[in-house]
Amino acid sequence: MLTKKKWAIFSLLTLCGGTIYKLPSLKDAFYIPMQEYFHLTNGQIGNAMSVNSIVTTIGFFLSIYFADKLPRKYTMSFSLIATGLLGIYLSTMPGYWGILFVWALFGVTCDMLNWPVLLKSISLLGDSNQQGRLFGFFETGRGVVDTVVAFSALGLFAYYGSGLLGFKAGIWFYSGIAILVGIFIPLVLDDKSDNQKESTDKPAQKNNNRISAVLKNKTVWMIAFNVFFVYAVYCGLTFFIPFLKNIYALPIALVGAYGIINQYCLKMIGGPIGGIISDKILKSPSKFLCYSFIISVVVLILLIVLPHEQMPVYLGMVCTLGFGAIVFTQRAVFFAPIGEAKIGEEYTGSAMALGSFIGYAPAMFCFSLYGHILDSNPGILGYKIVFGIMAAFAFCGVLVSVALVKNIYKNREATPVAS
């Protein structure tokens, strides 16, 4: 599918995507240590994630204006190095307000400056018929990187006694690897083709036309809201960790490992499955999202009615991980419809930024919402309420994805946006 050079670029981009989010996603492997050493409640961890997401959402809107203008290699390099430096500060164990400040800045370094540019770089490696597989294998690669890096950090945590020093060692490891990848990005990624395209038109006029075209395109908005509902459901996966600990009495030694499997290993399963089904079987990422939303609604209803307090812990793990795998097949391809809809290449970065601006907005409120529901409703009731809200989001996703499929097929023969 790709040339050797493109495979090298793809691998580096995957490494970038798999390392930059380790620090803002510290909860995945270190949820319990965060509560203990940062002195945070479920709601406060949710607040940190929500503050991060508020900044991220504003940043995604701003990135609509520069995602197709700034040199990709330097933008991604700066974002990785800055994220690593924030991690070093985090290891000083700042107070609650310091935590909120760091997570707010993660929204700038990881999301505003990096994510839309990274997505554009992945999309440009293939044509419209390869988008599902590209993004699917990108998620798989991220899952591999995520898993190796996170288990390495967890290993350091255990090596240094599973205490404060081990927690700091894990943070230092995440910080160091982000900085290292940031140093390598400019040595491999090439921006010459981008510069050549930009030089053909007046920059200001070209940028204004690009933004206007993307904002007026109905398909891009539908894709963005598709991402929105996938991500609203995805936010709930974080709370499967305390769910298994509190309801199923999952041993503390397995909590960190489960968090890594839940958030990272599932990418390795969901990525290729979502990409291959989208491209090879259904031949449409938008159709795949529609069907998978329907399955998500059914599974979430089952999670509500199951007698969890009478079920063995390993069955609970299978149920939650199985649902997580479904969500990760969706995450693998939820930006692929941009390529399926044949959005013009010069508008891809702006379209990705708009999709990210709308799509990741649930993180502004879902983490806090779910966390405070659990704090206010102890026991199984709180989790059933959360599962019910996730099911409602998934049902809304069914409605939007049906509209997206109809829109793409209606305009299949139309020219790309603003062409």
Image (cartoon, helix red, strand yellow):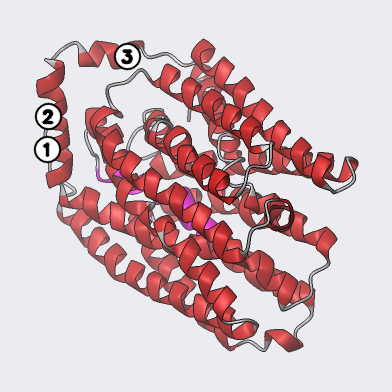
Pinpoint residue 208: horizontal percent, then vertical percent. Answer: 12, 29
| Residue closer to the observer: 171 or 70 | 171
State left or right for residue 168 relative to residue 185: right
Task: Determine the residue positioned at 74% across, 56% down.
Answer: 36
State left or right for residue 275 relative to residue 286: right
Callout in the foreground (3, 1): 1
Pinpoint residue 338: horizontal percent, then vertical percent. Answer: 30, 44
> Is there any visible trace of residue 54 in the rendered image?
yes
Q: Which residue lies under the disc numbered 1? A: 212
Q: Residues within 10 Å of mark 1 (few under 14, many from 20)?
A: few
Q: Which residue lies under the disc numbered 3? A: 193
The quadrant in which residue 323 appears is bottom right
Amino acid type at circle 2 is Asn
Res. 208 mark = 2
Task: Determine the residue positioned at 19% across, 48% down.
Answer: 412
Pinpoint residue 361: horizontal percent, then vertical percent. Answer: 36, 54
CB-based contact (under 8 Å), mark 1 and mark 2: yes
The quadrant in which residue 177 appears is top right
Q: Is residue 329 magenta?
A: yes
Per the model, the C-alpha gap separating discs 2 and 3 is 21 Å
Amino acid type at circle 3 is Ser
Per the model, the C-alpha gap separating discs 3 and 1 is 23 Å
266 lies above or below 179: below
SS at circle 1: helix
SS at circle 3: helix
Res. 196 mark = none
Q: Is residue 388 magenta?
A: no
How many numbered dots are placed on residues in this image?
3
